[in-house]
Image: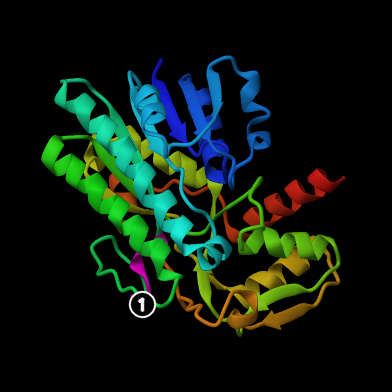
Amino acid sequence: MKQVLVTGGAGFIGSHLTEALLARGDRVTVIDDESTGNANNLVAARQNDRLTFIQGSVGEEQVVRELTAGVDEVYHLAAAVGVALIARAPMETIERNIFPTELVLSSLRERIQRGERVKCFLASTSEVYGKNPKETWSEEDDLVFGSTTRPRWSYGASKAIDEFMGLASYREYGLPVVIGRFFNVVGPRQTGAYGMVLPRFVEAALAGQPLVVHDDGRQTRCFAHVDDVVRAVVTLMETEAAVGRVFNIGSDQPVSILDLAKRVIELSGSKSSIAYQSYADAYDEDFEDIRRRVPDLTRLRATIGHLSDHNLDSIIHKVIDFHRHRTS
């Protein structure tokens, strides 16, 4: 039985990961300050006596040292979440992304230096690619950020610093680290409160309200079901060849945001219309978007194989079913 720590484990991805680790037979400790996560996401998991939930912050050094002592694996998912938060509070974004990661990695490096064994998964994001103009992004591509006067890039830049620290911890100290860059992960329990597009569309469609599409809606994204993503994370951590490397994790099947809105309306049986909103009205005048975001999954598939069980329609159906049951 592994002893595992999940930071941010009451969040959308974190709660699904926690359930998967419990199903594997692990003893899991979750810490979450519930700033964007919610303990209600763990209602089912908390029936398991192998789960310990702590409402607290990984920005506190003593807390981090106590929680990382003796665990076999750490899944560090705690971070700022969502475009809306990034645009509104760039300072909070930077601090919540970098400082806790520094504390976690420092504590784990000390254990490695004492001859102890521990492994770490570090959650990153497709935002680190910035506005790289390539059709698809691979892990060795350049990171292309915009001006520092555009707050949006603070998120990607701060997560890139997290990656640099994680890889340095592996190279200099031998800490086994696996880094995963998430691309538009969706599924049950995700909220639209922080700008996440699919739950926002589904909630509007079920309420008969207009689906608000930003700009012209021709931005391209790829949506992966959270179960597929979690399975990839767990499998990577079980694979020795993944240590010290960075992996894109998500789907590589692109769809425009406008087409996504139309598909949600059709599959939900809604009579909602589509409305358009400028980025300036949605966020602020300084907001800068990425037109195309498609991952190259060659490295992931070569390392752990193909792990996707969901296409876009099945994903949308599952999100619709979740929101219908939640409001019924």
Looking at the rendered image, the quarter that the C terminus falls into is top right
**Residue that mark 1 sits on:** 146
- List the single residue furthest toward the left: 172
323 part of magenta stretch = no
Name the residue nearer the viewer: 81 or 207: 81
Vertical arrangement, residue 121 with respect to residue 278, above or below: above
Residue 312 quadrant: bottom right
**Who's the residue at 79% across and 44% down the image?**
326
Return the residue nearer the eye: 272 or 30.
30
Q: Residue at x 22, y 40 (%)?
A: 241
Q: Is residue 21 above or below residue 200?
A: above
Start-end of magenta stretch: 126-134
Residue 228: image x %, image y %? 50, 45
Mark 1 is surrounded, within 10 Å at the Cα level, by few (under 14), some (14 to 19) or many (20 or more) other residues, namely some
Q: Nearer the viewer, residue 168 or 263?
A: 168
User: Can you say which quadrant of the picture contains the N terminus?
Assistant: top left
**Residue 150 percent location from the top left of the image:** 43, 76
